[in-house]
Image (cartoon, grey):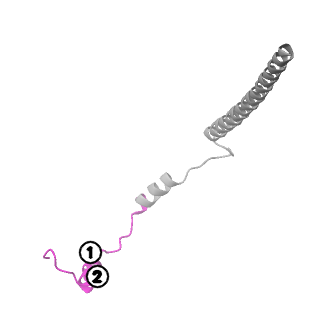
Amino acid sequence: MVLGKKLDTKKIEAWLEKSLVPVEPSPAFISELRGRLVVVRGNRAFSPWMVVLVLTALLIFIATWFGLGLRLLLTLLGLIGLVERRRRETKALVGKSSGTRANAT
């Protein structure tokens, strides 16, 4: 075979037919393969590792939502504090300016 030459599909098919011959696997190989693929679980419905994994995921999920709720609550309290502070400052400025005018007259 020379590099750069295009191979004919008929030749490729003929080579594949010669080289690819069906083979019957031995019974020992088949039983060993089945033994590796099949897992007998018995009467247990759930694996203990699966229970641990689900409980851990549930705990992480609850902690995440609790953290989110706490952040939202702190944000809301912060906003309420900012609004209240601004209201006090506005009242203090209005009180000072009205007091200054009263003293000037």
In-image side of 90 versus 33 (left or right): right
Q: Quadrant of the C terminus?
A: top right
Q: Give the residue furthest to the front.
A: 105
In-image side of 47 versus 84 (left or right): left
Q: What residue appears at the point 83 percent right and 15 percent down from the top-left corner?
A: 104
In this rendering, the answer to whether 55 lies above or below 97 is: below
Magenta-tinted stretch: 1-28
| Occupied quadrant, residue 51 | top right
Q: Give the residue furthest to the bottom.
A: 10
In-image side of 99 versus 61 (left or right): right
Q: Position of residue 19 (x, y in %)?
A: 26, 74
Q: Give the residue furthest to the top.
A: 103
Q: Write down the residue under mark 2.
A: 13
Q: Position of residue 75 (x, y in %)?
A: 72, 31
Element on which disc 2 rests? helix
The amino acid sitting under disc 2 is: Glu
Q: Position of residue 71 (x, y in %)?
A: 70, 31
Label 1 near label 2: C-beta < 8 Å? no
Which is more toward the observer, 55 or 25? Answer: 55
Q: What residue appears at the point 31 percent right and 75 percent down from the top-left corner?
A: 21
- Residue 19's tag is 1
The CA span between labels 2 and 1 is 10 Å
Q: Is residue 8 magenta?
A: yes
